[in-house]
Amino acid sequence: RKEVEQDPGPFNVPEGATVAFNCTYSNSASQSFFWYRQDCRKEPKLLMSVYSSGNEDGRFTAQLNRASQYISLLIRDSKLSDSATYLCVVPASYNQGGKLIFGQGTELSVKP
Amino acid sequence: IAGITQAPTSQILAAGRRMTLRCTQDMRHNAMYWYRQDLGLGLRLIHYSNTAGTTGKGEVPDGYSVSRANTDDFPLPLASAVPSQTSVYFCASSDSDETGEQFFGPGTRLTVL
């Protein structure tokens, strides 16, 4: 099983829609999780951190289910500016070296 | 400068040539990282440095060797470039190797022919 796996994209949604992405992880010892946003041909930027059961920031809600080892990102009232690739990020397990493992990303396209 | 910068922005390099991807941050972050991003494979960690003078191997270190002489700079030398090193390279930094937020540079797009 890969350390982190995300929903395959792309997601094409109309403005105002609610969209959810799921991400599963394999390292049951992980304590912190993250969602990064990456715009086309740009660097990733932190969107949200998730340390307990979840986190909410405006239209964005991240939820964590430790028993099932998955994280979700919910975007309400989608805006055109939400179009980007969303990366699920988990801490690396010891034998992988390094610190964070990035998922391949889920592409979101919000249409007028 | 404010934040983290990389140079060059892009480069086309003949196989066998050498070059150094540069990365500089002015946030006094202890930890720095080098990633490569390839289509279908996502971001993968090449090497990291928890503090100046120390480095560690990431997920894909083969073909790359790094050192970190000071806090601000973390260069990625390519001694003899090969086509498989064609990729987008991102440098990142964080103020602690325990926190999750990493700040990324704008990336270097490298093509090795």
Image (spheres, rainbow, N blue to C red):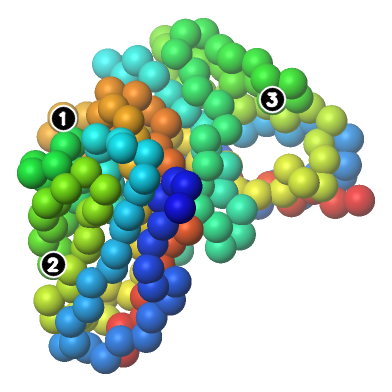
Give me the residue at 43% from left, 61% from top.
B107
Chain under disc 3: A
* Contact check, label 1 and label 3, Cβ < 8 Å: no
Q: SS class of the residue under badge 2? A: loop
**Is B48 on the left-hand or right-hand side of A45?**
left
Respond whether the residues carrying marks 1 and 2 are from the same subunit: no
Q: Nearer the viewer, residue B24 or B104?
A: B24
> Label 1 amino acid?
Tyr
Q: Position of residue A39 (x, y in %)?
A: 61, 53
Q: Amino acid at mark 3?
A: Phe
- Residue at mark 2: chain: B
The residue carrying mark 1 is: A94
Residue A60: give its label: 3
Mark 1: secondary structure:
helix
Instruction: Kindly report the distance in space between the C-alpha atoms of the residues bearing marks 1 and 3.
Output: 31 Å
**Marks 1 and 3 on same chain:** yes
Identify the residue at image location x=31%, y=58%: B23
Residue at the front extreme of this rendering: B1
Identify the secondary structure beneath mark 3. strand
User: Which label was assigned to residue B63?
Assistant: 2
Label for residue A19?
none
Rendered image quadrant of residue A4: top left
Residues packed near mark 1 inside 10 Å, few (<14), some (14 to 19) or many (20 plus): few
Residue at 16 percent across and 48 percent down: it is: B70
Let me know if residue B78 appears in the view.
yes
- Mark 1 to mark 2 CA distance (whole Å): 22 Å
How far from the left and from the top, in percent, is residue B34? 28, 53
